[in-house]
Image: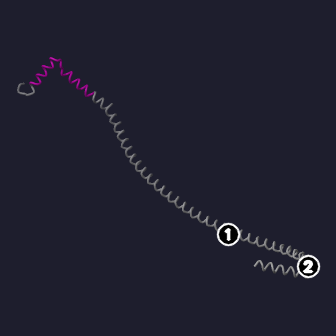
Amino acid sequence: MSHLPFANIIDNLQTVGTQTGFNIQQFIAQCIAFLVLCGFLWYFAWKPVIVILEQRRKTIEDSMINAEKTKQQLADAETTRLSIIKKANEKADFIVAEAEKSAAAITELRAKEATRQAEDIMKKAHEAAVIDRNRLMAELKAHLGELVIQTTQKVTGKVLTNDDLARLNTETVRQLEAGRN
C-alpha cells in the first residue's frame, strides 16, 4: 500500500476515524439521508418557491408592460387634452370675436335708432311748437284785433262798422306779419 500516494492519507483517516469514533457505514447512511432530505426539500420546498418566484417575475414583467402601456396612454391622453383645450380656446376666441362684432353692430343699430327717435322727437316738438305758435298767433291776432277796435272806438269815439273792423283786422295782421319777418 505504500506505492499509492493517497494510501498514507487513507491510513491516517482510518486511524483518526477509529480514534474519534468515525464509522464509514454511518457516514454513507448519513450521506444517503442528506441526499434524501435534499431531494425532499427540492421537491416540496425549493420547487414551489421557484414556481412562486417565476410567477412573481411574470407578474412584475406584465406590470412593467402595463405600466409602459399606461404611460403611453397617459401621454396620448395628455396630447388629446391639450388638443381639446387648444380647440376650445380657439372656439372661445371665435365666439368672443363674434360677440364683439354683434355687440358693435347692435350698439351701432341702437345708436342709429336712438338718433332717429331723437330726430322724430325733435320734428314732433318742432311741429308742436309751430302749431302752438300758430294757435297763439291766431289768438293774439284775435285779441289784438279786439284791443285795436276797442282802442280805436275809444280814441275816435265812434262805433266802427263791420267794414271798418275787417279793414283794421287785415291791416293789423299785415303789420304783425311784416314785423315778424
Crowd rating for badge 1 (residues with CA inside 10 Å; few <14, some 14–19, many 20+): few
Residue that carries the numbered disc 1 in the rendered image: 116
Give the residue drawn at x 90%, y 81%: 164
Task: Say whether residue 31 is left or right of residue 74.
Answer: left
At horizontal 74% and vertical 71% (from top left) the residue drawn is 126
Q: Is residue 82 left or right of residue 125?
A: left
Give the numbered dot on residue 71: none
Q: Secondary structure at mark 2?
A: helix
Q: Which residues are magenta?
A: 8-36
Name the residue nearer the viewer: 138 or 158: 158
State which mark lies toward you, 1 or 2. 2
Prevalent SS, magenta region: helix
How far across and how far down the image is residue 64, in percent?
37, 44
Magenta span has 59?
A: no
Among the 4 quarters of the image, the one containing residue 143: bottom right
- Which image quarter is the N terminus in? top left
Q: How many marks?
A: 2
Quarter of the image with the C terminus is bottom right
* 62 relative to 132, above or below: above
Give percent across and percent down for residue 4: 7, 27
Query: Whole-percent x and y of residue 86?
Result: 47, 57
Determine the residue positioned at 43% across, 49% down.
Answer: 74
Looking at marks 1 and 2 on the same chain, the residue that comes earlier in the sequence is marked by 1
Residue 115: quarter of image: bottom right
The residue to which callout 2 is attached is: 156
Q: Amino acid at mark 1?
A: Arg
